[in-house]
Amino acid sequence: MLLALLLIPLVTAIAVAAAPEKQARALALCGTLVGLLLSIVIAVQFNYQDAGLMQMPMSIAWYDTFGLNLSLGIDSISLVLILLTTFLLPLTILGSFTAVTQRAKEFFAWLCILEAAMLGVFAARDLIVFYVCFEFTLIPMYFLIAVYGSANRAKASIWFFLYTFTGSIITLAGLVYVAWAYQMSPEGTGNWTFDIATLTAFCSEHMTAAQQGWVLLALCCGFAVKVPLFPVHTWLPLAHTEAPTAGSVVLAAVLLKLGTYGLFRFAVPMCPLAITTYAPLLAVLCIIGILYGALICWVQTDVKKLIAYSSVSHLGFCVLGLIALTSIGISGSVAYMINHGLSTGALFLCIGMIYERYHTRAMDDYSGLAKVMPVWATFTVFFILSSVGLPGLNGFIGEFLCLVGTFISGDGANPGTLGPMYAAIAGFGMILAAIYLLYLAGRVLFGPLKLPDTHHHGHDDKGDDHAAPTLPQDLTGREVLVLVPIAVACIVLGVKPGVLLAPIAAPIEQMVSAVSEAHTRHAALLIDGAPPGLPPAEDDEAALASAEPMSRDIDTTDNRPSELGRKEGLGQ
């Protein structure tokens, strides 16, 4: 069933490319709707009692000598991200029916190919399958920006490709290093494997803290760029600004989540010792991104660029909750992935609808649009409030849990090393977000009516100049149909967040427990004087019990702070 889910958008892309121009839009919409229905069937059949286990597994051998397999499977984290992807793609395509007037077949075919690659990332259980899908997302996104973007699309597409490709190559080197180390170890017995579960267990249990540190660095090079974290975020505002509306929606809603998903799936479980050591450094980068992104939003005059920088700020919260290493914080991080995808994706749709009418993104060209476009203004205010984190809407629960999880991190009941100071500073980002987003609403939607100059010229989907319309026009029925499902999802997840939080609880608890156990095991090894990478003796209960007090005075070989040594024994 998972293989069918990946093949449907690929088959749809072929059908769209081969169909007449007039039928391309309908075929793309139908194909993505079939994918949505299949993902709903998968969600219904999913066993939520064992949400932390990989379900619906399938494996097809590729090349046994190197252990290459087409291995697929999902847990509840993968499931919710798959549902987000299949939910938004049909709406994005429907919202682009009139936005793309030239080379429409290729446009919708690239969107379908991009969907297949993103679904492959979330369903992959083999490192090579994951990496191939992860990298392949660059190709359709590159063409969506380079061919259908605005005037500066060439520079934007090149920056996007070079930034993300360079980081991904380093990540591949780190993953291959883990596979090579496994093959050379007694556990591997000379056999290669790229099974994610096997290599995750090997790296976390048998690699030293220093080795994990290098692996973590390699993983962060690719995933942090994709998120993106400060200071490797500079490609994102340009890519968002120049991309067509559909490209911006998919980029913000799903493609950026490949980075946070990679950190969740690989960085934390593979490198439990290293992630705890370097969590404070990563947290500082997150907080800088939160505050920097929010402050930059204040001075933006381009509506689309403002929302782009807001993503840098918002996703700082997402990563901060993840590296807090608390169940609450990681739950908030996953919730933030979903809710940011809905709210920010919807805001880009709203901006695209107004851009399609007037072909300008400059805030100075608009004022008082609520007077002439009340339906559009209502949806825009709704999604702004959702993005701000208004209680009762979906954006609130993710931010709240991320901050609470960060606050309690390092309190002795979990392996985290953050604390109240990090949460307090990051909390200013919520205030700044409310200021710049509400300012955007007040500037564009309210006040005296001001519409773009009738002689203003903009760019179509190929960058060609054309005049803006002179009369305002509110949303069409098709555009309302695009926004209503997202608004309903925002309300449901805001009023009843347990719909999302309950299914994802099991794998998150397993991750936190695994990190705690890794620290307990490492502390016991230091006490025993055993070589790193070897498990403690089965009868060494006394050493495990004494790990907390003794670890304070131990000089660890990987030079981690002695305060961390105190926390390592708390996982027992």
Image: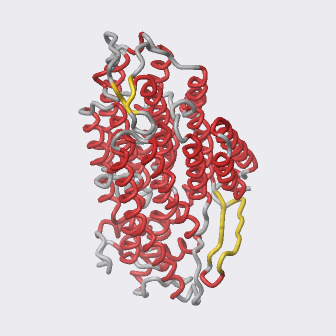
Q: Residue at x 44, y 11 (%)?
A: 372
Q: Residue at x 33, y 64 (%)?
A: 278
Q: Residue at x 56, y 25 (%)?
A: 479
Q: Position of residue 524 (x, y in %)?
A: 44, 78
Q: Position of residue 36 (x, y in %)?
A: 68, 42
Residue 107, quarter of the rendered image: top right
- Using the image as rendered, state which of residue 255 and residue 389 is in the foreground: 255
The image's colouring method is: secondary structure
Q: Is residue 237 visible?
A: no
Q: Position of residue 126 (x, y in %)?
A: 59, 69
Which image quarter is the N terminus in? bottom right
Residue 168, quarter of the rendered image: bottom left
Q: Is residue 87 visible?
A: yes
In the depicted structure, whether residue 474 falls above or below residue 168: above
On the rendered structure, is 497 left or right of 33? left
On the rendered structure, is 14 left or right of 421? right
- Using the image as rendered, state which of residue 335 and residue 192 is in the foreground: 192
Q: Position of residue 514 (x, y in %)?
A: 52, 65
**Number of numbered discs visible in the structure rendering:** 0
- Using the image as rendered, state which of residue 145 and residue 47 is in the foreground: 145
In the depicted structure, whether residue 449 falls above or below residue 348: above
In the depicted structure, whether residue 1 falls above or below residue 551: above
